[in-house]
Amino acid sequence: MTLLIPFIAIGVFILVIYLTLEVIPSVPTGRLAETLTPANGAALNGWRKTLAVLDKPVSKWTPVSFVRKVRADLYWAQVGEKWSDWNDVQFISLRVAAAIAGLVIGMVVFGEAALVLALAVLGFQYPAIAMGGVARRTRRQFVAQLPEYVQLVSAQMSANVSMEEALRRTSLAQSLVGKWMRKVLQMAQGRDLIEQMQREAQESQLPELIGMAVQLEFIRRGTAQQELMGQLATSIAADYIGNAEQRAEKIGSELVIPMVIFYFFPFMVTLLMVIGWPIVQNMGGM
């Protein structure tokens, strides 16, 4: 383990030199530009400001698929009013910093390679676990509320209201879907509402939401909009019920192993101790 310390120190030194000294000044582009220059023009503060030195290498070396996954989870965590103003690069920088902190703490406290690696992995995964839990709960709540919201839109359109006006009226609903629709309406000022919904749906990477946004575009182009919206509401409700039944069946099968481990084995051990131990004593006395 002591052989790794010089290499780690050299790596940290090279990283510091790379981050602080640039031979050719350049203007950041892409995700890095969004990180260093927030869209609202507000200055970075807190952890985001402290970890800004990691944003450049993170944006350069992180795989696109990994960034896309983080962006989707962060999107839904922010819908749940958590991790506000963070973007994907900043969050990955936080995970990298937590991994480095775990590595250093493990080297100082334990010194064992396995424990050091375990702390580094724990530091890297803990922010994702914390944020991912919020994102999963928000997704499930959103999907559960989506059929009712589409039915409200269908009811509004049945009263001879246009689709755009029905979406505006139902956005006042006190639900996650209503909150999401209010965000879409705010961002769609001066733009096409359905197209903005499609962009937000793609950003969320939620299949149910992407499918609904695509269907709304077909409904808008159709002639019997009220009937088509009613069919869409029925279809979304049926899909949700089917998915819920599948999850219930999957949970039932997944609970078999924990039940065997935590209930059946302790029961058998207790039974053998109560019944078998006296028999063993009697056999020893013979």
Image: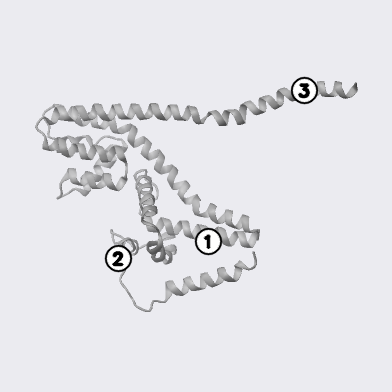
Q: Which residue shows up at 20% across the image and 36% down it?
A: 215
Badge nearest the viewer, 3 or 2: 3
Quarter occupied by residue 49: bottom left
Which residue appears farthest toward the right when viewing the image? 286
**Neighbourhood count class around disc 3 (C-alpha, 10 Å): few under 14, some 14–19, many 20 upward:** few
In the image: residue 124, left or right of residue 237: right
Residue at (34, 44) in percent of width and height: 79
* Residues marked 3 and 2 touching at CB (< 8 Å): no
Q: Which residue is mark 3?
A: 276
The quarter of the displayed image where residue 161 is located: top left
For marks 3 and 2, the one nearer the N-term is 2
Which numbered marker is on residue 148? Answer: none
- Label 1 sits on a secondary structure element that is helix
Report x, y in % for residue 149: 26, 32
Inspect the image, locate mark 1, and give the three-letter code of the amino acid beneath it: Ile
Q: In this image, 24 relative to 230: left or right?
A: right
* 263 and 187: which is toward the camera: 263
Quadrant for residue 277, please give it. top right
Q: Earlier in the sequence, mark 2 or mark 1?
A: 2
Residue 29 numbered tag: 2
**Residue 43, how many percent across, how many down?**
34, 63
Q: Quadrant of the N terminus?
A: bottom right
Circle 3: residue type = Gly
Quadrant (top left, top right, bottom left, bottom right) of the C terminus:
top right
Q: Name the residue carrying label 1.
A: 100
Q: Earlier in the sequence, mark 3 or mark 1?
A: 1
**Left or right: where 197 falls relative to 135:** left
- Distance from Cα at disc 3 to Cα at disc 2: 73 Å
Q: Secondary structure at mark 3?
A: helix
